[in-house]
Amino acid sequence: MNVKYINPLLESTISVLATMAMVQAKPGKPSLKQGQQSLGDVTGMIDLAGQEVNGSLAIGFSEPAILDIAEKMLGERVSVIDDTVLDVVGEITNMITGSAKRLYSEQGIEFDLTLPSIWSGNDKIIEHKVKGNPIILPFDTTAGQFYLELCFS
């Protein structure tokens, strides 16, 4: 996969979490995804539809990571994955893809975004709407891990 598709999402993820939750997300080594199972305890997914290329993004958070992020974003104690945390995952997914959309546009790549789908449970299957091998970008925070899963055609 071309880095021109990866870098805007990488940059946007780090920026959004630093700005909105004061969380430093440290990226790890990208890899090809094996299988279709969700990598997080709660996941947000959004499709990117363009004239020249289509893609999708899934962001899967471990429970400790998303509870810490939600607590910092909301300014109140969060101890379980509930509807409020699911809303936070949807908002983070929107903010990351919205920021990346701006960066893609600066490169002359235009996308329309769908509404995010959100689910909890690490036993869910992620089905990308586009053909291709998903790339996993792991991130570490002081509270736990999360994963960006990217697929572009």
Image: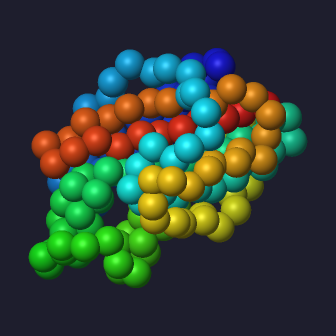
**Residue 3 in sight from this viewpoint:** yes
Whether residue 69 is visible to the viewer of this picture, yes or no, is no
Report x, y in % for residue 126.
63, 49
Residue 35 located left or right of residue 95: right
Q: Residue at x 32, y 71 (%)?
A: 81
Residue 10 in picture, x, y percent from top left: 44, 34
How far from the left and from the top, in percent, is residue 41?
39, 56
Q: In the drawing, does residue 13 fall left or right of residue 73?
A: right
Residue in the picture at 22% in, 45% down: 144
Q: Quadrant of the C terminus?
A: top right
Residue positioned 25% across, 52% down in the render = 65
Nearest the eye: 35 or 69: 35
The residue sitting at 44% across, 30% down in the picture is 137
- Vertical relation: 106 (above or below) 21: above
Front one among 106 and 7: 7
Q: Where is the N terminus found, in terms of image quarters?
A: top right
